[in-house]
Image (spheres, grey):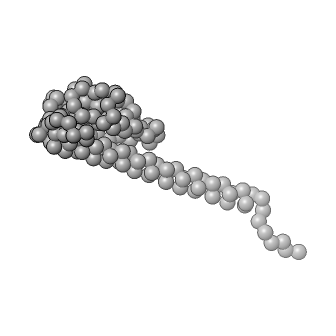
Amino acid sequence: MKMNGFTLVEVLVVGFFVMVLYTLTTQSLFRGQRSTSLTEVSGQLVRDVRESQIRAMQGKTSSGGGLVDHSIRFEADRYILYPGLVYESGNPENQIVTLPPTMQFASINIPDQTATFGRGSGDVRNYVSGSDTITISDGAIGKTENIRINRRGVVFVSHE
């Protein structure tokens, strides 16, 4: 009498391989999404830097006040875009951008953790050569992106 079917050992071996493949596939997918997320966050920062520079070149506030500089203040887990040279926490024109939970600014190597764009020219007023980079890191995947802002406000991004 011949019996058809699989033994318990065969079923366990196949189940083990399926679980290993599933684990590897899902880890690869999530790692790719986080990497994309880091790229998106640094891209948003670059766009915000450029927007702040454009506002400074135009020199006006959203409330229509006189000509002003525009600045970006960097903190460990967020950055703040604001009009003027001095950060005022209660100013309704401030724009606060918080980084995702797994990300932070690993290094803020710019004077006073602030980049200020001069009205009219858009040049970085407080520029110091060699002190012009910000590093964003994603602790979940161990990747970083460096953002450098030169004297003219041109932004460069490099990946590590």
Q: Nearer the viewer, residue 76 or 14?
A: 76
- Image quadrant assignment for residue 73: top left
Image quarter where the N terminus lies is: bottom right
Q: Position of residue 99 (x, y in %)?
A: 40, 38
- Residue 13 located left or right of residue 61: right
- Residue 61 located left or right of residue 98: left
Q: Give the residue displayed 54% in from the left and 53% down from the top.
A: 26
Q: Position of residue 12 (x, y in %)?
A: 72, 56
Res 134 visible = no
Q: Residue furthest right?
A: 1
115 versus 7 height, above or below: above
Q: Give the residue displayed 77% in from the left and 65% down from the top.
A: 6
Image quarter where the C terminus lies is: top left
- Image quadrant assignment for residue 138: top left
Q: Position of residue 59 (x, y in %)?
A: 16, 39
Q: Give the residue displayed 11% in from the left and 40% down from the top.
A: 120
Q: Residue furthest left?
A: 121
Q: Nearer the viewer, residue 52 or 21?
A: 52
Res 43 visible = yes
Q: Nearer the viewer, residue 55 or 131?
A: 55
Q: Nearer the viewer, residue 65 or 56?
A: 65
Task: Tally the numbered discs.
Answer: 0
Q: Position of residue 19 (x, y in %)?
A: 63, 54
Q: Give the residue displayed 66% in from the left and 54% down from the top.
A: 16
80 versus 18 height, above or below: above
